Amino acid sequence: MTSEIKQKKLMFLFKIFFDRDGNGSITKEDFEQSIEKLAKAKGWEPGDEKYKIAEKTLLEIWEGMLYKADANKDGEISADEWVKLWEESSKDSPFDWQAYYCKSIFRLQDSGNDGAIDKEEFVSVHKSFGLPEDQTSEAFDKLACGKDKITWEDFQQRWEEFFTSEDLDAPGNYIFGHLTFV
Ligand SMILES: [Ca+2]
Ligand SMILES: [Ca+2]
Ligand SMILES: [Ca+2]
């Protein structure tokens, strides 16, 4: 059973980052929209290497996610299937879909490719998802606990916190930007 706080965090993710067109389920079109918006925010053109990498990464996430989550096989991920996906994932081995997803999101944000996410990288990605810059910048400070970048080690810890912690003050709650319960 997913607790109320965890459920709210998952629905925040669902609404802000995944169901981009707001039709109540996640489809491939939502992912395509994310690729476009991200590329626009980063100034990448369709032929660019970074565009291709981002596109490949996001579509791989979509396919992995659909495969695991789509219980009724209608090609879409409903809100119920979404919450269930994360319940099931926490029971998996460490080399699972969630670990892959965590790594992909890290790589996607570290566009300078120096092994850490700095504030500018963090803010630009979240901006492409329509999140306000000042709030995201504050979220970064909380997430990084005052440091100027987030290493892969820190990122994995914060990630785990987001999906498992019941504590609303945990720094990991800011890993997807300023957390709002919508
Ligand atoms: Ca949708
Ligand atoms: Ca489905
Ligand atoms: Ca970086």
Image: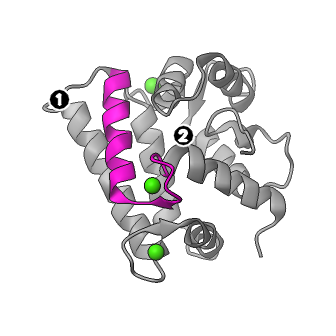
Indicate left or right for 8 with 45 as reference. Answer: right
Q: Position of residue 45 (x, y in %)?
A: 19, 26
State which quadrant residue 6 falls in: bottom right
Quadrant location, the N terminus = bottom right
Indicate left or right for 31 with 175 as reference. Answer: left
Task: Find disc 2 in the rendering and name its residue.
Answer: 152
- 40 within the magenta span: yes
- Disc with the residue nearer the chain's start (2 vs 1): 1
- Kind of residue indicated by mark 1: Asp
- Number of the label disc, if any, that sits on residue 48: 1
Q: Is label 1 within 8 A of ligand 3 (CB to nearest ligand atom)?
A: no
Q: Residue at x 30, y 40 (%)?
A: 54
Q: Position of residue 140 (x, y in %)?
A: 65, 26
- Kind of residue indicated by mark 2: Trp
Vertically, is 149 above or below 77?
A: above
Decide which of 178, 100 is in the foreground and name it: 178
Vertically, is 101 above or below 108?
A: below
Q: Residue at x 29, y 20 (%)?
A: 43
Q: Would you say residue 95 is visible in this rendering?
A: no
Vertically, is 63 above or below 171?
A: below
State which quadrant residue 152 falls in: top right
Q: Position of residue 85 (x, y in %)?
A: 57, 71
Indicate left or right for 59 with 150 as reference. Answer: left
Indicate left or right for 167 with 114 as reference. Answer: right
Q: CA distance from mark 2 to mark 1?
A: 25 Å
- In the image, the segment drawn in magenta is 19-42
Q: Would you say residue 101 is visible in this rendering?
A: yes
